[in-house]
Amino acid sequence: MSDATRVYRSPPREGSPVSDPTEAPPDDGVKITIDGREFTAHKGELLIAAAERAGTYIPHFCYHSRMSPVGMCRMCLVEVDSGRGPGLQPSCMVPVSDGMVVDTESETTKRAQEGILELLLINHPLDCPVCDKGGECPLQDQAVAFGPGESRFVEEKRHYEKPIPISDLVNLDRERCILCDRCTRFAREVAGDPLISFTERGNRTQVLTFPDDPFSSYFSGNTVQICPVGALTAAPYRFRARPWDLDQVESTCTTCSVGCRIAVQSSGDQIVRRLGVDIDPVNHGWLCDRGRFDYESAYSPERITDPLMRGRAGDSELIEATWPAAMAATAETLREAIDAHGASSVAVLGGARLTNEDAYTWSKLARTVIGTDNIDSQLADGLAAEMVLTLPRATIDEACSADTVIMFGVDPKEELPVLHLRLRHAVVEDKVPMIEFSPVETSLSRHCRSVRHLPGALTESVSELLASEGERIGSGSVVVVVGRGSLAGSGEDIEAAVAAIRQAIPHATFLPALRRGNVMGALQMGLSPGILPGGLAFSEADRLGEDWAGSQPVVSDEPGLDAAGILAAAAAGRVAVLILLGADPLADVPDRDLAERALAGAGTVVAVDTHLTVSARRAHVVLPASGPGEKAGTTTNLEGRISRLGPKVTPPGTARPDWMIAVELADRLGVDMGFADSRRIWDEISTVVPMFSDCPVERIESPEAQDGILCRPAGDGDLRWDPPAAVAAPPVDAYALRLVSSRKLYDQATMTANSPSLAGLAEESRVRLNPRELDRLGVTDGGRLAFVSPRTRIIATVSGDEKVPRGVMAMTFNAAGPAASELIELGTVVTEVRVETL
Amino acid sequence: MTDHFTPANLDLAHEIIGRYPVKRSAMIPLLHLAQEQDGWVTEDAMRQIAELVEVTPAEVLGTCSFYEMFKRQPVGRFLINICGTLSCQLMGAEDLIHHAEQTLGITSGDTTPDGLFTLAVAECQAACTEAPCLQVNYRHRYKVTPADFDDLVEELRRQAGEGEGPDPQSPETAGVPRHGVLSVARQHIPAERAAGPSSPTTNQGPPVWMPPPDAEEPK
C-alpha cells in the first residue's frame, strides 16, 4: 500500500470530534509509542482515540467516540506490544498502558485489515452506484485504502428484502449491513429508545424492529449519519443527491434554542441535508429529527416568496405586491399611526426566529425610529425576560456535571431534544443526581427522583424539598434547569419557585430551557419591554451610545407592554399597527380567544414571516423573510453561546433577511441606520453593547468560534427582577380537572407542519387522562368527552395514560384538532376544566 | 397493557420477576413461561413480557430470536428432533429421518396437520455413544431404529388421545409433557424462606456467606 493512501482520514462529518493533538500532561500521562513516535496519552484512554489524537488514523467501523466500545467489526486490529511481544489487538477495546508499542503499519496489521475487509465484503452487495452512501461511505473508502483489492468469494451472497422502512424517516437495507452495532448502540445508550435490536443469530443476524413497532425515536436520523455503510438511509434524502455534488457550510440549527452545530448541505441551490457536527459543549454530533429534517419547510407551497398585500378596502384577498409598494404602504401606515395615536400605538410581537443581528436592528428600529417599547419576542408562553437576563446562568456542561440538577417546567425530550440527550447521559451514565418537579411523568422521570405536584403548586413542592433537604443539596454545586412547561397556568408559579431556590441556595446557577430558536438572542438584543440590548435597563441607555441615549422619550418612559399587554391592547382597539416578527399568536399564545380578538382589533397587521401561518393569513401586509440556511449572522443558544450561521442557498423569490426589512422601513421613516450587511450590524453590537465588547466580528469569524463564544450577562446592571410573592395554589376543585398543556416535539409549528416528512408525525389533539379517571367517567380509549373551562367548551378524544396522575388532564399544546389554547385564559394561575359526558 | 398471560401465569410471572434484583433479568424465564403456556412464543407474549420487565418489545425479540429453542411459530404438541450430526449419521440417522418423514407424512421442519408432531433435524445432542438418537420435547430416546420410531409415535398418539396429557406440576406423571413445558416440577420458594434479591448496585458489602475478615480460620 502506498504512503499516499495511508494518509486517509475519516470523513470530517463522521462523528469523531476534531482531533486534538495536545499531549497529556506527564503526571497524568501514559507514554506509548505509535509507529515509532512517542506520544503521551491520557490515563485510561482507548488506544484508537490516543492514536487519532497523535495523528495516526486507525481504520474502524464500529468504534464511535461518543459511545462505548464494543469491538464488533475487528477493523481496528493493530499490532500491540505491551511487554509480552507483539500481538493483534482491537485498538478500540484496549486502554493505553505505559510503554505500549503500537505498529499500525506492520505486515501483520495489514494482513489482518485486508482479511477483515474481505470478510466484511463477503455479503455486502456492492450496489454502491445506487446507494445514497456511495462517495462518503467508510466501508467504500476503507476498502480502497486498506482492502485486499479483490475477493476470493464466488458463492451467492445473502439476500434480504431491500430496503424496508423501519420508521417514517429511516429505511433499512439489511444486505448492506455489516453488524457494527452503531445504530442499535445509539438507540440504547444515547437515545434511550431501544426500538431496534439485533435479532436472530449467526449468519442470519440482522437489525430489526419489533413487528408493527417502528423505530419512532426522535433521534432516528442520527443512526443514518453514523451508519458506516448504506444500510440505514434517510427517506427525505433518498436519491436526492450524490455526496460529490453537495456543497456544504457549517452553521447552527435554529429549530430550538439548544443550538446544535450542523453542516448544511445543498445541491443546485437547494438544501438537501443537514448533518450534526460534533462540538464538545453542545450537541456531541447528535441532532433531533426535527432539526435534521425541517429544512424541507423551505420548499413548502406555504413559503412566502413575495410580499403580499390587501387592497385599501381592507377585506380583499392577499395579493402579490412589489417590495417598494409593500414597504411604502407599511411605512405610510406606521407614520399615520404615529401621527394620529402616538408611537405607543405600534407594537411588535415575536423575534425568536431572527438572528442576533436581525433582532438588534428591529429592537433599534422600534425604540429609536418608531419610538415604541411595546415589543416582546415571547408570546406569553415563556419566562419573564428580567428573570432570564439576571439569573446567574449555567452551561449545558455545568448542568451535566453538577452535584445536583433540579429541573422543572420542561420535558427536554419534547422541547429541547439534544439537551435531553445530554441530561439523560449525565443522569443515566454519569449518575448525576437529578430532582425533577412535574405535574405529569416526563421522559426523564424513570431515571431520576421525580416529584409530582398539582398544577399551580410547584412553589409549595419546591419549598417543601428545600426545607427538608436544602442544606444537603446546597452543600454542593446546583444547576436549575427551568422552562415554562405547562402553558395552562401563568409563569408566576415557576418564577416563585426560582426565587425560593435563589433564597435557599444562593450559589445555584440556572439554565433557562426556553424553546424557540434564538429566543435568548432576541432577549439579549432587547426584544422585551423595558430592556435594552445587553440586558440593560432604560436607566443605563447612555451606556449604549448616543443613538440609543438620544432616543427620548421612549427609553425614559415607563416600560411598554409585554405580549399579554399588547394582545389585550390590540383586542381593545388600542394598537394601530401590530407587527408580527415571525410570530403566530393564533397558534402559540396560550389563549386562543384573546389572540383572535387581538388580530381582529388591531388596526393594521404586518406579518414578517417565512410561511403563510394562520396569523399571517389575517395580516394586511405580509413581508417574506429569509429562513434558516438562507442568511448570514449569528445566533445565541440557551446558554448564551453565540455562534455563526452559514448562509448556503439563496432565499426563494424575493425574500430577504429581517434586518434588511427593518433598515428599509427606517429609511422610509427618514432614518438611515447605516447597516449594509449583518457583519456591520454585529460590528455595532460589539462596539456599543458592553456585554458583547469582547466579542468583535474578528473573534466571531475566527476558528475559536466553532464551538460558539459564551457571553453571559455580567449581572452588574440596573435591570432588576422582582420575583412574585409565592403564589398560593387555588384549592382543589374536586369536580374539575386541572389542565396541563405542554408541547410535543412534533406539533403544528410552522417549520414542522410545512416539512412533508415530519408533518405526518404530529399527533392529533387528544386529552390524556389517568386510566382510572376514564373508568370513573365511563369512557374507553378513543371515546369523546366535553371539556368546559371558563373560556369555552370543547369536545375532544380521550385516551388513558398512566403518566398522568388523577385530577389532572394533559393536552398537547398546538396539536391539530381542538386546541388546548381555546380552554386557557391568559394570566390565570391554573385552568380548571369540568368534564361532561356526551 | 397487553393481556396475554393467563391470570395464574401472570401471578407466576410477577413471582419470577421478584426473584431478580433487576427486572430485565427475568426476560428468559418469562419467555419460557410464555412458551409453556402456548407451546410457542407469540408476539403478544413478547409485548407483555416487555411491559413486565420494562424493556422494549424489540429487545425481547432480540433475546428471544437469539435462542433457537424459543419457537416464534406454532409447533406441534411433540417436537421431534432427530440428530443429524456425525456419529448418528454413521449409525443410520439418514434412514431414520427418511423413515420419520414417511411415517408422519411431512418433511423435516413441518408440522403434521393434526398439530401433534413437528419434525426437525438437529445438531449433536451429546449422546454419541447412543447413536442414532432423537429428542421428543428435548427428552432423549437412544439407539432409535425405525421400528422404535413407529412405537414412539404410536405411544405419543395414544397419550395425546387421553387428553391434555400428564400434569406438568405432578412429579409422578410419566410420559412426555407438551412442547414448551420445561419441567414437571416448578421452583417455588416460600416467601418466609426466600433470601430475596439483592441489588448489585446498592449492595456493596461482601456476600452474606463470606466470613468476616477477623473470623478464625476453620480448623
Image (tube, rainbow, N blue to C red):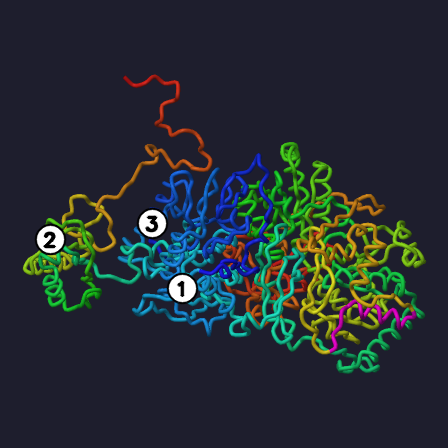
Q: In the rendered view of the protein, which quadrant contains the N terminus of chain B?
A: bottom left
- Residue type, label 1: Pro
Tag count = 3
- Residue type, label 3: Ile
Examine the rendering and report whether any part of residue B204 can be seen: yes
Neighbour class for label 1 at 10 Å: few (<14), some, many (≥20)?
Answer: few
What residue is pinned by disc 3?
Answer: B28
Q: What residue do we see at 43% from left, 63% from top?
A: A143
In the rendering, which numbered label is found on residue A211? 1
Q: Please check the rendered image and state whether residue A667 is part of the magenta-colored stretch, yes or no.
A: yes
- The residue range painted magenta reads A654-670
Quadrant position of residue A752:
bottom right
Neighbour class for label 2 at 10 Å: few (<14), some, many (≥20)?
Answer: many
Q: Nearer the viewer, residue A623 or A654?
A: A654
In the rendering, which numbered label is found on residue A400? none
Q: In the rendered view of the protein, which quadrant contains the C terminus of chain B?
A: top left
Q: Nearer the viewer, residue A597 or A409?
A: A409
What residue is pinned by disc 2?
Answer: B131
